[in-house]
Image (spheres, grey):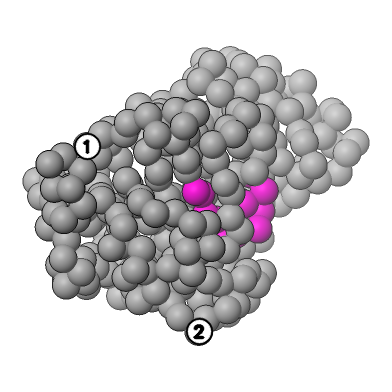
Amino acid sequence: MSLFEQVGSLLDYQVVRALAVPGINYLARRQKRGVYRISYDQGVWIHQTLHGYFAYPHPFIRLNLVDFDSFTRAVFFRAYCPKDGDVIVDIGAGAGEETLTFSRAVGEQGRVISVEAHPKTFCCLQKLIQYNRLRNVLAVHRAISEPACRVLHIQDSARYLRNRTGAGAGPTVPAITLDELIEKQSVPRIHFLKMNIEGAERLAIHGMKRTLERTQTVCICCHDFLADSTHDETLRTRKYIAQFLRKCGFDLIDHNGDAERPYVRDQVWGWNPALVVRATG
């Protein structure tokens, strides 16, 4: 267990929390990064900001939470322009920072389906939805994977954004294909599909062909840049995903790369020309 995890685990004790919360709030406000109140709710730390509420397994004092909205818009609204009433599917929603922006962008008549596999992170997603009163968001606790896969293990490190599904230790999570999920939710049209599942997209795409037929714009976040630094070749999926989308009839969107932001450079964007023509013709 890392030092960060050891310190964080002490906050599981009610007496320690009672003593620590005033100091945590004082330090958070001193940072002047948009967090002006941090509280504890059933295993989740709620961070209140001018932009809304964010929920995490541990209190974050130095994280600039107010920038998440502009970040999400810069990264995910580059090739997709949300409209009132749109349907967005957020696969690998994490703690919900992007879900918050998506929900507000599609309005009360819109719909967001946010899927997260990790149990603790899913609890944070639920709390974000609850505290921000996002009535147009459905949270789904599932791992999106290939057909015939029904249970997966997921890593359980403090760096929750890097937890990956697969073999090995960690909690188990129920798995489903994206096609099965979308059909269960009776979604006739998806205006934007975002997938960010840390390399598991290599398997997930084999269970999402029917979903893509009803999807206008898709963004699959690949992690070749992590393969470069960790030498884990299972993370190198960008070319494979691009080929798959072309075979499914998608036109790829060239975002001209982004050397300074490799996580943007490794995104694969595509749009379904048949659906776009029908929608605008």
Name the side, left or right, on which 142 lies relative to 100: right
Q: Which mark is residue 172?
A: none
Point 35% across, 76% down: residue? 206
Query: Looking at numbered disc 2 in the image, what kind of residue is underneath it?
Result: Ala
Front residue of 241 and 276? 276
Mark pair 1, 2: CA separation: 35 Å
Other residues around mark 2 within 10 Å, as few (<14) / some (14–19) / many (≥20): few
Q: Quadrant of the image for the N terminus?
A: bottom right
Helix, strand or loop under label 1: loop
Q: Estimate how packed mark 1 is, as few (under 14), some (14 to 19) or many (20 or more) residues with alpha carbons within 10 Å.
A: few
Q: Is residue 16 visible?
A: yes
**Is label 2 in a helix, a strand or a loop?**
loop
Magenta span includes 114: yes
Give residue 43's position: percent from left, percent from top.
Answer: 76, 44
> Residue 253 appears at what percent x and percent y?
13, 51
According to the picture, the residue beneath numbered tag 2 turns out to be 148
Q: What kind of residue is marked 1?
A: Arg
Give the residue displayed 43% in from the left and 77% down from the top.
Answer: 146
Is residue 275 found inside the magenta-colored segment of the image? no
- Looking at the image, residue 13 sits to the left or right of residue 101; the answer is right
In the picture, residue 242 is in which quadrant? bottom left
Residue at image point 42% right, 61% down: 197
Q: Are the residues tagged 1 and 2 within 8 Å (C-beta)?
A: no
Write the start and end of the magenta stretch as one range: 113-124
Tell me where residue 154 sits by quadrant: bottom right
Q: Of the residues tagged 1 and 2, which is closer to the observer?
A: 2
Q: Earlier in the sequence, mark 1 or mark 2?
A: 1
Vertical side of 228 occupied by 221: above or below: above
Q: In what quadrant of the picture does the C terminus appear?
A: top left
Counting from the top left corner in percent of width and height, residue 120 is at: 66, 53
> Is residue 269 depicted above or below 104 in this figure?
below
Circle number at residue 78: 1
